[in-house]
Image (cartoon, grey):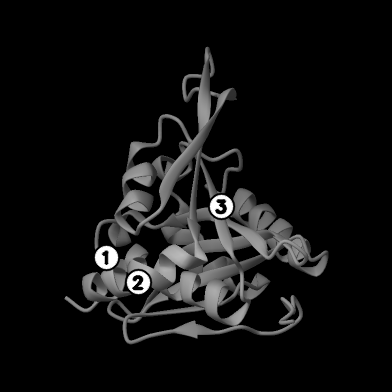
Amino acid sequence: MVKFEFDKEYILENGRTRLSPLGLDHIESLRSISDDSSIWTYFLENGQGAENLSKYIQAAVENRKERREYPFVVYDKKSNAYAGMTRLYEWNEDLRTLKLGHTWYGTQFQGTGLNKQCKYLLFEFAFEQLEAFRIGFGVHGENARSLNALASVGCKKEGTLRDFLWKVDGQARTDLILLSILKREWQETIKETLRLKIIH
């Protein structure tokens, strides 16, 4: 059975983007694009500003050492620049399940098709290299952009954790929306559908 080797340097790459393991050396490369409050609106963490970003990345790197998650830094070949971050986490080797999230991109990379490129590589890696059966996602109930983006790459809504999070205003509660994509869905339709989207 294939193992998720957290110490291994996984590189996921195509003609548009490269996902490589996040390191402390990426702090400076990501600092300018992370310094936008709109990126962090729906996050429990806050990577805005040099100090916050350093703590954010240090925590992600430490979580990899503890085998809790595997953070990737996203490089956009079209712009020749680092574009953001994403993570695989909560890997369960017995059940062959994991989650994908903590994804963010600088505002100049949003809506460019980069997210679909990254999701294709991550789905391919999870289902075909790790032999996972399921990828799960959790999205803040007010985050329409992320919900639409996940739907556009084939993820299906499967549940709601009611009043699980604070609303953006911090004065009331909102839901956590649960979504997923399954290996059989990837094999049967989503892989080809998404492949056709990213080649245009």
Q: Which residue is pictured at 25% across the width and 57% down the height?
A: 111
Mark 2–mark 1 contact, CB under 8 Å?
yes
Q: Which of 137 and 21 is in front in this view?
A: 137
> Which residue is the site of mark 2?
117
- Within-10-Å neighbours for mark 3: few <14, some 14–19, many 20+: many
* C-alpha span from label 3 to label 2: 18 Å
Q: Which residue is pictured at 42% across the width and 68% down the height?
A: 186
Q: Which residue is pictured at 35% across the width and 57% down the height?
A: 154
Q: In this picture, is 166 found above or below 138?
A: above
Q: Which residue is pictured at 36% across the width and 63% down the height?
A: 115
- Secondary structure of the residue carrying tag 1 is loop
> Which residue is the site of mark 1?
113
Q: Where is residue 153 in the image (x, y as percent from the top left)?
A: 34, 59
Q: What residue type is labelled 2?
A: Gln
- Secondary structure of the residue carrying tag 3 is strand
* C-alpha span from label 2 to label 1: 7 Å
Q: In this picture, is 32 found above or below 197?
A: above
Q: Where is residue 142 in the image (x, y as percent from the top left)?
A: 41, 30
- Within-10-Å neighbours for mark 2: few <14, some 14–19, many 20+: many
* Mark sitting earlier along the chain (1/3): 1
Mark 3 or mark 2, which is nearer to you? 3
Q: Quadrant of the N terminus?
A: bottom right
The dot on residue 155 is none
* C-alpha span from label 1 to label 3: 21 Å
Q: Which residue lies furthest to the right in this view?
A: 66
> Which residue is the site of mark 3?
136
